[in-house]
Image: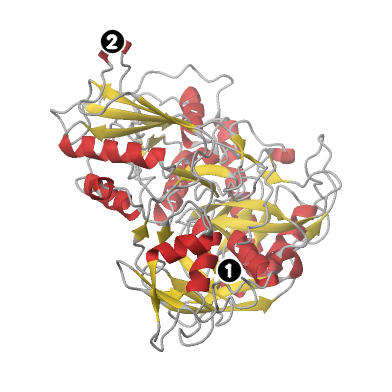
Amino acid sequence: MSRPGQGVMMPVNGLGFPPQNVARVVVWEWLNEHSRWRPYTATVCHHIENVLKEDARGSVVLGQVDTQLVPYIIDLQSMHQFRQDTGTMRPVRRNFYDPSSAPGKGIVWEWENDGGAWTAYDMDICITIQNAYEKQHPWLDLSSLGFCYLIYFNSMSQMNRQTRRRRRLRRRLDLAYPLTVGSIPKSQSWPVGASSGQPCSCQQCLLVNSTRAASNAILASQRRKAPPAAPPPPPPPPGGPPGALAVRPSATFAGAALWAAPAAGPAEPAQPPGASPRSPSAPGGAPTPGQNNLNRPGPQRATGVSARASIPPGVPALPVKNLNGTGPVHPALAGMTGILLCAAGLPVCLTRAPKPILHPPPVSKSDVKPVPGVPGVCRKTKKKHLKKSKNPEDVVRRYMQKVKNPPDEDCTICMERLVTASGYEGVLRHKGVRPELVGRLGRCGHMYHLLCLVAMYSNGNKDGSLQCPTCKAIYGEKTGTQPPGKMRFHLIPHSLPGFADTQTIRIVYDIPTGIQGPEHPNPGKKFTARGFPRHCYLPNNEKGRKVLRLLITAWERRLIFTIGTSNTTGESDTVVWNEIHHKTEFGSNLTGHGYPDASYLDNVLAELTAQGVSEAAAKA
């Protein structure tokens, strides 16, 4: 199947730019609550680019070109989107794609939601669908992008592989996304236009400008009140909340620090959630040190504030809590409260969000022990050590029984009736496999055209195994495309939350960067391996050791990782998890990847079984 076009991200002060003398299509995107980058429409992207050319540090009022986006403003300096009525903030990015891809041609692929409205696919999925459409593929499997959907071009539908539910999809011609050519000088990343001419008089711009003017007035008053030199920060006041940061008004007050931990708001289907307001700047356009730092991680921002912080004696600190809550109003309340309190000369106390405990306390080599009942402490995988790929026709015939009189129902691979020829007739030819032949899989009994199963196998890993596309039953031994690496495992003398009297099994995965093989998305191209070595944890009880043994089997079958597109960062051609969840937090469960989690061991056993890895399968 075809692969997505490569997006190129090259951040400079939060903004990307294309390589020198290379034409690229510009697509602006925002990050939703599922960590997916969602594209703005071409019209909105043209509007953002026009504002960017005039003032690279300015704000973009989206409601000027799209009435559905009236509450939203993009701050180009902090690269955040801000929703004015709720205070919700979202990161935005400027991404680049090949001019010959779908956004460069103005082609948009959309699916129909439950309300009958049409929703655009993510840009990488849109490009993948368009590539398959141009190559006249009858269907497209999106599992390589992390989605369990099949796209059928004959019926223009999308099917969920698990629920079998179908939705309509459509291909629509729209305005092409903006094109940019050339590079930006290093001395000036973006041309900043002169602030001449009449300002826009729409209500949103007036609101933005009045808010900015008020913020600058508050900052100016604080500078007049500020002493010549700030005294060194005293220790936290007795009885204050642990981890609290006290901030008093001063010349170094950073408005952006009040928004230290923006909370993601609930999804709003018709329009993207919002981003942060622009941080106030010093007179003359030069930013005051410590301001406009929303692109820095929260702990760095908090550290910067703490280094300058002090509380006037005798004045109680007023905490602004729950900055990491799930409600969209918390960041807005925190920012407004901080501005008002600082304007009144009162201190502001920000409560730090708890940090996940990813690793156990240090362990000496003498305290590291082998896991009882599990031989060895290390497993290695090398370059593809599987058997040579077998004849697809022979593999399919091994697991199927010929059906002489098939029922009048759909083949769920090509979506043609079983009583007619396969949809791959004329596309794929195999000696001895006639397009009208139908077979039944031995264990599950599901029926397909033989030619369709041959096509499905040929597009897979070609490892001699076959997986039923309807019920996911696996025939043979399924293997994956995990790159070469090392898996180590041992006992450490510490306990996981919820397993107080039990030692811990620590698993360490290490995969280096390398070159993709023929089984990977882009053979011959380099792949990255972010975040390795990765540490994972299991309790040292009977079920935990069982999970470890099966994880070792999955590792040896190259099923733990694969090469694809990261759901977290959007990076392509990188090593990602492959549908077998691991616990990477040792002493907390703030991200959902830690303990206590009473159902985790049962869940991961079910995930391993779905990959064909189980004790029953090993004995069979």
Q: Nearer the viewer, residue 534 or 274?
A: 534
Q: Nearer the viewer, residue 533 or 322?
A: 533
Query: Which residue lies at the image location 59% right of the left edge and 46% below the top edge?
Result: 571
In the structure shown, which secondary structural element does the residue marked by tag 1 occupy?
helix
Colour convention = secondary structure
Q: Contact (CB < 8 A) between labels 1 and 2?
A: no
Q: Nearer the viewer, residue 420 or 516?
A: 420
Which quadrant of the view contains residue 550?
top left
Q: Is residue 154 left or right of residue 103?
A: left
Sequence-wise, the earlier of marks 1 and 2 is 1
- Checking the image for residue 366, the label placed there is 2
In the structure shown, which secondary structural element does the residue marked by tag 2 occupy?
helix
Q: Is residue 25 left or right of residue 595?
A: right
- Residue farthest left in this picture: 501
Position in image of residue 248 (x %, y %):
46, 31
Position in image of residue 85 (x %, y %):
48, 63
Q: Does 592 sit above or below residue 26?
A: above
Q: Is residue 212 left or right of residue 534?
A: right
Query: Which residue lies at the image location 45% right of the left edge and 52% below the top edge?
Result: 332
Q: Does 165 sit above or below residue 11?
A: below
Position in image of residue 499 (x %, y %):
16, 33
Position in image of residue 92 (x %, y %):
60, 52
Closer to the eye: label 1 or 2: 2
Give the amino acid type for the residue marked by disc 2 in the picture.
Ser
Question: Is there any visible trace of residue 444 in the rendered image?
Answer: yes
Q: Which residue is mark 1?
A: 69
Q: Is residue 193 left or right of residue 269?
A: right
Give the amino acid type for the residue marked by disc 1 in the picture.
Leu
